[in-house]
Image: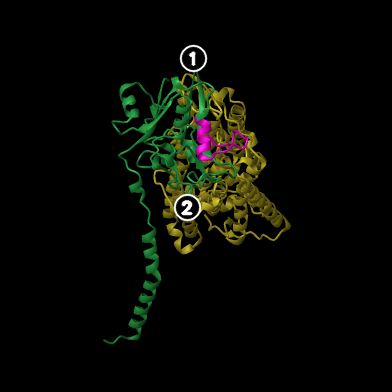
Amino acid sequence: MAHVHYLKIEGRSAGFFALLALLGAVIAAGLGATWYMEHNGHWVTGMNNQVMWGIPHVFAVFLIVAASGALNVASIASVFGRQLYKPLARLSGLLSITLLAGGLAVLVLDLGRPERLIVAMTYYNFKSIFAWNIFLYTGFFAIVAVYLWMMFERRFNDYTKHAGMVAFLWRLTLTTGTGSIFGFLVARDAYDSALYAPMFIIMSFAYGLAIFILVLFAATRWTGRPLGDVMVARLKNLLGVFVASVLYFVVAYHLTNLYMTGRHDVERFILLDGGIYTRLFWIGQILIGGVIPLVLLYSKLGRSRAMISLAAVLVVVGGLAQMYVTIVGAQAFPMPLFPDKEVSSSFFDGVVGSYTPSLPEILLGIGGFGIALGITVFAIKVLPFLPQSLADADVDPHHKAA
Amino acid sequence: MSINRRQFLGLSGAAIAATALAPGLRLIELAQARSPEEATTSLHRWGLLIDSSKCADGCTSCVSACADENGIQSHGRPATDAQWIRKVTLKDKQTGHVQTLPLMCQHCEHPPCVDVCPTGASFKRADGIVLVDKHICIGCRYCMMACPYKARSFIHEATTGQKQHAPRGMGTVESCTLCVHKVDRGDGSTACADACKKEGHQAILFGDLKDPDSEINKRLASQQSTQLRADLKLNTGVRYQGI
């Protein structure tokens, strides 16, 4: 295979600056929303003492999960030696860093006391999964930065495989940590399951690749760089496998719960009569995020890049729905404090927690996407992350012109 | 003795540093209070015994006494207002039997809130009281996700009328302190227990679970009692009777 040529994007067109301005506006709106929330206190959000993690956490956890998944393309090249993916490895590493930055920004800006971030960096309780995650996230930035350096610096190219292996193992650990935030919570019926760690890993594969495909399509199209059908077909099929795997884990998780009599109530809530959460599960998570993308990717429709893009968008939308069900739905379901009793109190015991997302929260969450994409757009202008060509003849050693 | 210029500069520097630092060190020494280790000891374990059968339906004296004692004010927004203690009504699904009880932080021996707190702001004192250090709480609410008793509140808006012994701050999490200021003062009771006694119900008994001569210990030893969510094996400091 020919040597890959990477080139910065020109980044002088009106379209480029319009895109930067748009992302800048999204980020500004998110920061404005943060100021409003922090100035008034969280009572201006929809979050309350029953549902204390809301839309900001939905977006933040989604982005953090997607971040580790976005690194997969690079891992496939470096760790599993697939040459075809090698030209995409730099963009993969970049996206993993920027998505993590976006997700963490949302998470931190939603804290009750975000100005005390330094406290979180200096006081540690090592039994807390959050504390582990602080190390896992900062370590991820450092390791992927080194990994990218090995890719960029020709002298160090030989070490790419090693750096890639470390990054791959680290990202698996990181997503294990993210899933375990929920999996290790014994108090709530919907959590307390070791399945959360592997389920989050497979979710990261799907979310991360969906975002990667969208960014790759946009970047090559808007810069007029060729992107061959061989590459597109590989990415498309890979996304399909990941989406199907997510569905498998979701089925396994719910089947386990359905077998346990003690968890029938929470399963009934999510699957049957939980109102918005049931709708988001079946329509958002399963249909929009799983079934429709699979049909789009594996039917004849999958030959169209527009349909592949649509499938990727739906995976993102379905992923956000899945996060909403996972994070908000689990809190809305009443705590199982007194089995066999109907419980009531002035503190909303025994009733489904109410939560209506407010505009500032939503703006903060979307601001996370703005940060991730804004840094990405800026980075591909100042450093050569994107290959000059991903045409079939340039990426596929076995390609024969038809 | 002769010294060269390098040694002279070194000695001068050391002398200046010593002059600058010494008063500071001295001040720290003078200002030193009793260490936390001296203040609390694991020889005690403070707790409550709550008898649901004595808890009167409709009576909320313990709740208002707690609010008065600790300066907790309602903003008229029940979903975001803090509640350190609440009255819970239970109705048996099979028999229809109705009872009420006060519910607050259970002051677990193995508190999940302390496990998950990233900064260590949630902590358990040697005498078993679970508290939040408002100075290092970052307001992440992970403890609220982890608490099986829904015992914690996030401060959603600016607070007024704070009590000196119960500092509260917007953006941090708080919960029942077991009236730690009264415990440290040697009152031997909590505001909720006092109020319940004053009403003549005596449903809440405060005491030292480790003192064999304490009333709470004697009653626990001689009568049936239970822990909420005993399946989690958290060994709560608050025990219940009559449920």
Left or right, B144 with reference to B16: right
Q: Chain A appears what colour?
A: yellow
Q: Chain B appears what colour?
A: green
The residue furthest left is B1
Instruction: Find residue B97 and name its label.
Output: 1
Count residues near mark 1 (Cα–Cα under 10 Å), then give few for <14, some for 14-19, many for 20+: few
- Magenta stretch contains residue B69: yes
Q: Position of residue B71 (x, y in %)?
A: 53, 40
The region drawn magenta spans: B62-84
B242 to B24, vertically: above or below: above
Q: Nearer the viewer, residue B210 or A322?
A: B210
The kind of secondary structure element at disc 2 is: helix
Instruction: Find residue A119 and name its label.
Output: 2
Q: Position of residue A114 (x, y in %)?
A: 55, 50
Label 1: chain letter: B
Count residues near mark 2 (Cα–Cα under 10 Å), then give few for <14, some for 14-19, many for 20+: some
